[in-house]
Image: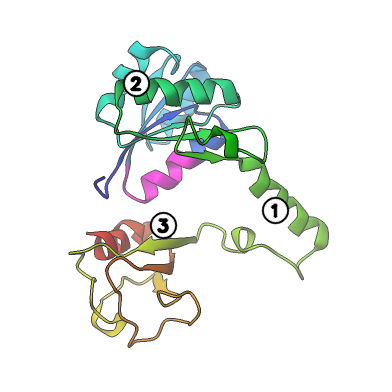
């Protein structure tokens, strides 16, 4: 799939809205399908996605959202059944599309026959709640980074930074490669960005697109 991806998200509530905000920061094109007019207005006012008011389980609505040309379809409503229906319908309309469904339970392994990936947002919320309960001495990474993105990025063949050392790559201010390809050693100027290997990268949202261009092309 191309690095700049076309993403259709079913659900413009808390999870869907915040997801498209992050995707927009990373330079991707998003379309949100939502039944609630007020939620549609909220997403539209934030200028992070194209918004279609309608039912994403309707084939016509999904086609209007561009599912036949989309790289990814994500069902992120509060109902697991609706999310699975959206993903299954998307596969029928576009067999090459990647599908992601929000689920309502921690164990989503048995959904693997129907979707490419599942997400359970409440798990992340529980981690943040535990951080607050325990106080500042014990925190999860997702809690302490705020708007800072911690990414696990695979360097693409032919990317501008591929095969170069960090000393040779002009990363923008507001970004840093944290680990080598093994994840065992902190990255150094002599660390080589090997194509096909993954690296932990910390990046501010404002420069995320530039960093992705360097590492992914």
Give me the residue at 42% from left, 36% from top. Answer: 46
Label 3 element class: helix
* 3D distance between C-alphas at marks 3 and 2: 34 Å
* 3D distance between C-alphas at marks 3 and 1: 21 Å
Residue 174, position as x, y percentages in the image: 40, 69
On the image, which quarter does residue 122 sit in?
top right
Residue 142, position as x, y percentages in the image: 60, 58
Q: Kindly identify which numbered label has been placed on residue 92.
A: 2
Which segment is the magenta one?
A: 19-28
Residue 130, position as x, y percentages in the image: 77, 55
Note whether 146 is above or below 37 in the view shown: below
Give me the residue at 55% from left, 27% from top. Answer: 77
Q: Nearer the viewer, mark 3 or mark 1?
A: 1
> Which residue position holds label 1?
128
Q: Is residue 25 magenta?
A: yes
Q: Nearer the viewer, mark 3 or mark 2?
A: 2
Dominant SS in magenta: helix
Note whether 213 is above or below 188 in the view shown: above
Could you tell me if the residues under marks 2 and 1 are in contact, i.e. CB atoms within 8 Å? no
Give me the residue at 29% from left, 26% from top. Answer: 94
Could you tell me if the residues under marks 3 and 1 are in contact, i.e. CB atoms within 8 Å? no
> Which residue position holds label 3?
205
Label 1 element class: helix
User: Is 3 displayed left or right of 59 in the figure?
Assistant: left
Instruction: Using the image as rendered, state which of residue 66 and residue 25 is in the foreground.
Output: 66
* 3D distance between C-alphas at marks 2 and 1: 37 Å
């Amino acid at each position: 799939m191309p690095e700049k991806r076309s993403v259709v998200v079913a659900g413009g509530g808390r999870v869907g809205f915040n997801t498209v905000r992050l995707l927009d920061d990373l330079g991707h094109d998003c379309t949100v399908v939502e039944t609630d007019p007020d939620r549609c207005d909220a997403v539209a006012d934030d200028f992070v996605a194209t918004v279609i008011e309608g039912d994403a389980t309707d084939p016509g609505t999904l086609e209007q959202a561009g599912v036949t040309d989309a790289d990814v379809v994500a069902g992120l409503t509060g109902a697991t059944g609706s999310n699975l229906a959206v993903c299954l319908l998307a596969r029928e309309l576009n067999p090459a599309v990647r599908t992601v469904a929000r689920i309502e339970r921690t164990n989503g392994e048995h959904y693997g026959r129907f979707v490419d990936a599942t997400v359970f947002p409440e798990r992340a919320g529980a981690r943040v709640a535990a951080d607050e309960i325990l106080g500042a001495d014990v925190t999860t990474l997702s809690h302490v980074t705020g708007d800072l993105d911690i990414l696990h990025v695979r360097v693409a063949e032919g990317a501008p930074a591929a095969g170069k050392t960090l000393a040779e790559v002009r990363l923008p201010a507001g970004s840093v490669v944290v680990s080598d390809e093994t994840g065992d050693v902190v990255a150094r100027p002599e660390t080589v960005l090997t194509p096909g290997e993954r690296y932990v990268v910390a990046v501010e949202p404002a420069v995320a697109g530039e960093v992705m261009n360097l590492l992914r092309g």
